[in-house]
Image (cartoon, grey):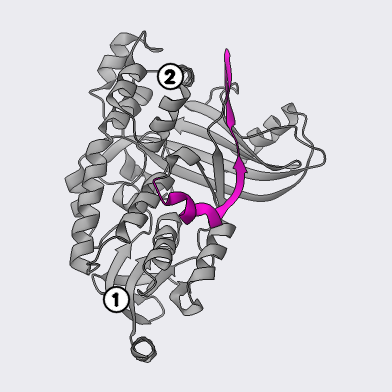
Amino acid sequence: MQQAQRDSGPQAFTDIAILGGGLAGSLIALAMAAHRPELSVTIFERGERLGGRHVWSFFASDLPRGGEALVDPLVAARWDGYSVRFPGLRRQLTTPYRSITSARLDAAVRAVLPPERIVAGVDVAAAEARGLVLADGRRFSAGAVIDARGSHGLAHMAGGWQKFAGRALCLSAPHGLTGPVVMDATVEQIDGYRFVYCLPFSATEVFVEDTYYSDTPDLDLPVLRHRIDAYAARAGWTVERVDYEETGVLPVIAQGDFDRFWAEGGALPRAGVRAALVHPLTSYSIPDAVRFALYLTTLDNLSAERLGRISHDWAAQHWRERRFYRMLSRMLFGAAEGPQRWRMLARFYALPEALIERFYAGRSTPLDMARILAGRPPVPVGAAIASLAGKGRPLADLAAAGGL
């Protein structure tokens, strides 16, 4: 009754207000619904549908304890392994692979939150620690506000970009794939390290993504569409229709000043890319989003002040722990010319499968790190050493390219 009275007033109340209904914000809402049902949680999303139009993928080994139960309702496809293709190397790996779709994300959140707890299709005009105002004038008060709206470039950080265009293709005949092709780098190397990524959602449905580790954030969609069509044609596939399309430009973090980045981002608690909670080299965000969402459910004190300190300390610890991957990003962008970058990835994929699993999960051991760096590097030694002093392009430039 008390909650109903608070909600019926001129300024609705919620225990936790989440700005942004993307992956990070939605996972927090799902985790709270599962583990802290006594709390009211409201998502504020500028789009009409949570998650937009995206496919997110991850390895089953990426998830922390309790993570599988959290993400299971979001998973649209599961495979028992995956393959990679490079010039001179083709390998089948057995690590289970999963894909989440935005449609499943939207449905899962709507299944656990009451309709009034999902406020979509409107911008947030202003937000502070304990409340927000929407562009249409509605006001909400909150025990705490968490900013999970992604980012329009990472200020005070530098590196490169992973950019892509993906198309969901419906074919006239079976494609013949037995599992995902996570990297096909046998394609022409253009605009940095290029690979094609294929997810077979059914015998005649395949999601094909053309991806680049590039020095620039610009993305020419008509050109990438043409390259995807050409890839399908070379595979012998006849495309009946394109069911949907997505694009993305993600940061590949090589270096940065975390304290300045955080200070410039405002005083609100943060999650997801807005807190730089991504793998610096792969740009994967699911493992970190799941870990942070589950951690928040264990806190007794979820006040605005407490969440502000927690999110900063969590992100700062993540920044310290990921320095090895930032070093590899500097080597990838600084030690090799764009057309030769594939050699670093090909060498990596020749390493033991367990090491590869820990790498993607952000849990590389000191022995793993030594193994990755051991032996003759696939790039000139002098260039590899020089790259460690490089910084890359400012990732705040991403704002000029339309954001993340």
Up-down: is 75 above or below 8? Answer: above
Q: Position of residue 394 (x, y in %)?
A: 30, 38
Q: Residue at x 49, y 45 (%)?
A: 248
Relative depth, front residue between 57 and 192: 57
Relative side of 254 to 56, left or right? left
Vertical placement of residue 68 versus 346, above or below: below
Q: Position of residue 390 (x, y in %)?
A: 26, 25
**Which callout, 2 or 1, points to the residue nearer the camera?**
1
- Mark 2 and mark 1 lie on one chain; the one further toward the N terminus is 1
What's the amino acid at mark 1? Ala
Give the class, few, some or many, for how many residues have Cα within 10 Å of label 1's Cα (few <14, many ≥20): many
Residue that appears at 27% across and 24% down: 366
| The residue positioned farthest toward the right in the image shown | 172
Question: Is residue 84 found left or right of 147 in the rendered image?
Answer: right
Q: Residue at x 45, y 37 (%)?
A: 162
The circle drawn on residue 344 is 2
Which range of residues does the magenta coloring cover?
64-92
Question: Label 2 crowding class (10 Å Cα cut-off): few <14, some 14-19, many 20+?
Answer: some
Residue 54 is one of the magenta-drawn residues: no
Q: Residue 284 sits in which quadrant?
A: top left
Distance from disc 2 to disc 1, alpha carbons, whole Å, reads 48 Å
Quadrant of the snapshot with the N terminus: bottom left
**Residue 142 - label:** 1
75 part of magenta stretch: yes
Q: Which amino acid lies under the numbered mark 2 shown in the image of this protein?
A: Met
Name the secondary structure under disc 1: strand
Residue furthest toward the front?
A: 65
Residue 235 seen from this side: yes
Pointer 2 and pointer 1: residues touching (CB < 8 Å)?
no
Residue closer to the observer: 190 or 57: 57
